[in-house]
Image (cartoon, rainbow, N blue to C red):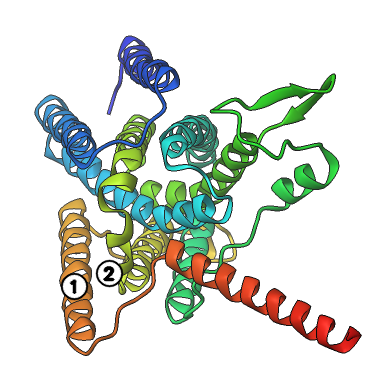
């Protein structure tokens, strides 16, 4: 797939333009978007992605069009998993609803920059070392196993651990107690302080960087074209903010999402390993010769597996949720879980204080 330099620059320029427009509008009027607003914007981004994919299909052929759609769907499904962590971060840091949209947008901009660097590094590695597919494949298979295990974990916080960089910043730099709108820095008593919004943005950015370690190898298992890798990530991340506000607590009903994503990563990991075997040049494997019996999984089959897995995951999740609700089992949302924990902690503190007063008496 030959992409002219002007097309690359035009795509990047349009992407930056859309993001700057969003930042400008949201920065002037922080607010919690309505359901209608989120649905309208999300439909617009999805429509743009579909139109772009059809254009790729028409301009470069069905092979590349299928690769884009497969990559976009995979990135979008992985992004939905990201939303669980985003919700937890927003809840833990008690981000006011009217500021959450801005925090998400800035975090997504950071994620785009980081993923752009990952895409460039991945493309350079693939072009120079065919054996890197072994590493990508093994990493995705390992990630799939870990994700499946996390799906069995009933931890309400989804296994989220605060990034070490965030912990370091909170320990070594002064942070203001009060929210100051969407500002990242504020001056108090002649000192420059970080704001809670800075901590939120840093948390989202670092978390998305960790997710990029999974998503970039995954999409390179579906296409080796950096242009398609970049555009698939752009369209997936652009709709993430709207999706956050549109479905919110509905994510809690996708009880089998971790298993579905684990299967997808396992499938793509195996696909990468098979491709590496087919292109093998490592001297200690088959004498450095290509392993001709290793099959190449066609993109149409990958697309069928991706769509089928997502459909089965959604149907099975909602069916289980319906059965659980019929039995009176209702899962807590992250916000509800945190609120309950805070209430229990407060009650425990009051009880301890009461006991202390009694002992003193």
The residue that appears at 43% across and 57% down in the rendered structure is: 276
Q: Position of residue 220 (x, y in %)?
A: 39, 46
Disc 1 packing (10 Å; few <14; some 14–19; many ≥20):
some
Q: Is residue 132 visible?
A: no
Quarter of the image with the C terminus is bottom right
Mark linked to residue 208: none
Quarter of the image with the N terminus is top left
Disc 2 packing (10 Å; few <14; some 14–19; many ≥20):
some
Distance between the Cα atoms at labels 2 and 1? 6 Å
Q: Quadrant of residue 170?
A: top right
Q: Which SS class for mark 1?
A: helix
Residue ID for mark 2: 253
Which residue is more in the foreground, 9 or 106?
Answer: 106
Compared across the picture, whether 276 is left or right of 288 comes to left
The residue that appears at 30% across and 78% down in the rendered structure is: 330
Residue furthest to the top: 6
Residue furthest to the right: 360
Which residue is more in the foreground, 24 or 282?
Answer: 24
Which residue is more in the foreground, 345 or 237?
Answer: 345
Q: Is residue 152 visible?
A: yes
Q: Position of residue 359 (x, y in %)?
A: 87, 88
Q: Which SS class for mark 2?
A: helix
42 shown above or below 244: above
241 shown above or below 329: above
Residue ID for mark 1: 318
């Amino acid at each position: 797939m030959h992409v002219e330099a002007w097309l690359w620059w035009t795509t990047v320029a349009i992407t930056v333009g859309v993001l700057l427009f969003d930042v400008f509008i949201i920065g002037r009027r922080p607010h919690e978007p309505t359901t209608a607003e989120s649905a309208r914007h999300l439909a617009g981004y999805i429509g743009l992605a579909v139109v772009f994919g059809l254009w790729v299909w028409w301009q470069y052929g069905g092979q590349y069009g299928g690769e884009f759609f497969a990559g976009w769907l995979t990135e979008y499904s992985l992004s939905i998993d990201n939303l669980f962590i985003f919700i937890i971060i927003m809840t833990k840091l008690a981000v006011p609803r009217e500021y959450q949209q801005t925090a998400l947008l800035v975090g997504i901009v950071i994620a785009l920059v980081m993923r752009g660097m990952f895409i460039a590094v991945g493309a350079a590695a693939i072009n120079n070392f065919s054996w890197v597919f072994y590493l990508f494949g093994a990493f995705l298979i390992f990630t799939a196993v870990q994700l499946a295990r996390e799906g069995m974990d009933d931890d309400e916080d989804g296994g989220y651990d605060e990034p070490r960089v965030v912990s370091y910043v909170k320990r070594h730099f002064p942070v203001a107690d009060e929210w100051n709108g969407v500002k990242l820095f504020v001056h108090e008593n002649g000192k420059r302080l970080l704001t809670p919004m800075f901590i939120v943005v840093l948390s989202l950015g670092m978390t998305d960087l960790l997710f990029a370690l999974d998503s970039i190898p995954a999409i390179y298992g579906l296409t080796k074209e950096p242009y398609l890798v970049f555009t698939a990530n752009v369209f997936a991340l652009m709709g993430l903010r709207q999706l956050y506000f549109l479905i919110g607590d509905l994510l809690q009903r996708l009880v089998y999402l971790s298993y579905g994503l684990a299967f997808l990563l396992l499938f793509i990991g195996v696909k990468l390993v098979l491709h590496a075997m087919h292109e093998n040049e490592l001297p200690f494997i088959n004498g450095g010769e290509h392993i001709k019996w290793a099959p190449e999984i066609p993109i149409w089959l990958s697309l069928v597996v991706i769509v089928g897995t997502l459909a089965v995951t959604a149907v099975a999740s909602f069916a289980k949720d319906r059965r659980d609700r019929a039995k009176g089992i209702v899962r807590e949302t992250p916000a509800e879980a945190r609120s309950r924990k805070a209430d229990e902690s407060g009650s425990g503190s009051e009880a301890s204080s009461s006991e202390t007063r009694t002992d003193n008496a």
